[in-house]
Amino acid sequence: MALAILSAVALALGVYVIARLLEHVSSRRANIVRSLAGGVTVAFVVLDLFVELAEGTDEAHAIVRGGPEPVHTTAVLLLVGMIATFVTAAFVAHHGRQRHLVELTPHLGYSLLVGGALVEEAHEGPLPLALFWIAITIHLAVVDHGFSHRFHLEHQRWTTFARAIAIVIGALVWHVAAPSVGVFHIVLALVAGGTLLMAFRDEIPSPERANVGALVAGAAAFTLLQQLRWWHA
């Protein structure tokens, strides 16, 4: 448990450092940084998020039914999370000025799950934990930088701090409560719906503005890390 908590704290610090580095570089190379981040996001969604969802279909289906087959349940949960995120964001856009708080919520939910995943990876050994730590630190740093840039929060560190707290809380809750794998995947699918909506809407540059080389490099780097994780397992 101590290793998982230490990893959670180190992950939070790593996210902060890399996000600030991206912020510094983007002031001079904004298009390259955005494209690099977009490549990381694409690879994360396809190689990490989709795979995690696919691996947990049976466990989630055993608790809640969204159709006759496990894959139907995961699809319905994704849709519910996506629609809920969109409806909430639309309501806030028309009736308030706190859109960034609404869009931060799925990110915090995912950070809680990351904390729980760290506990599980720690059980697998130091190398699986290290590979997961590197991959997820890069992804969360990209998300944090993009979020701050999108809402002009470059000089407000509270969003990064909130993510850090969520990661540590997730690790503690997972260790103490030890929820079932099915519950984990149900929550993951709901959060993933909102994450997918925001990733493809906000974090991937348009073809007209993208630096193709940087985007491919970002996707390739994350893919390499995922391959190392898969083959080691």
Image: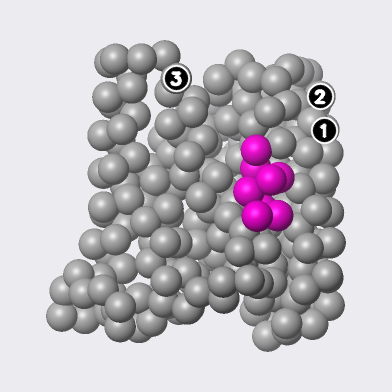
Please give the residue where the numbered disc 2 appears in the rendered image: 24
Pointer 3 local density, CA inside 10 Å: few below 14, some 14–19, many at least 20: few
- Percent x, y of residue 48: 55, 64
From the image, state whether disc 3 or disc 1 is nearer to you: 3
Q: CA distance from mark 3 to mark 1?
A: 26 Å
Q: Can the viewer see residue 216 in this picture?
A: no
- Find residue 182 and report its image quarter: bottom left
Q: Which residue is mark 3?
A: 98
Disc 1 residue crowd, few under 14, some 14–19, many 20+, Cα 10 Å: few
Residue range (magenta): 162-169
**According to the image, label 1 marks what residue?**
21
User: The residue under label 1 is which amino acid type?
Assistant: Leu
Locate the N terminus by quadrant. bottom right
Q: Amino acid at mark 2?
A: His
Q: Are marks 1 and 2 in contact (CB under 8 Å)?
A: yes
Along the viewing direction, whichever of 131 and 204 lies nearer the viewer: 131
Q: Main secondary structure of the magenta part?
A: helix
Q: Given the image, on which type of amino acid does mark 3 rest? A: Gln
User: Relative to residue 97, is residue 72 drawn left or right?
Assistant: left
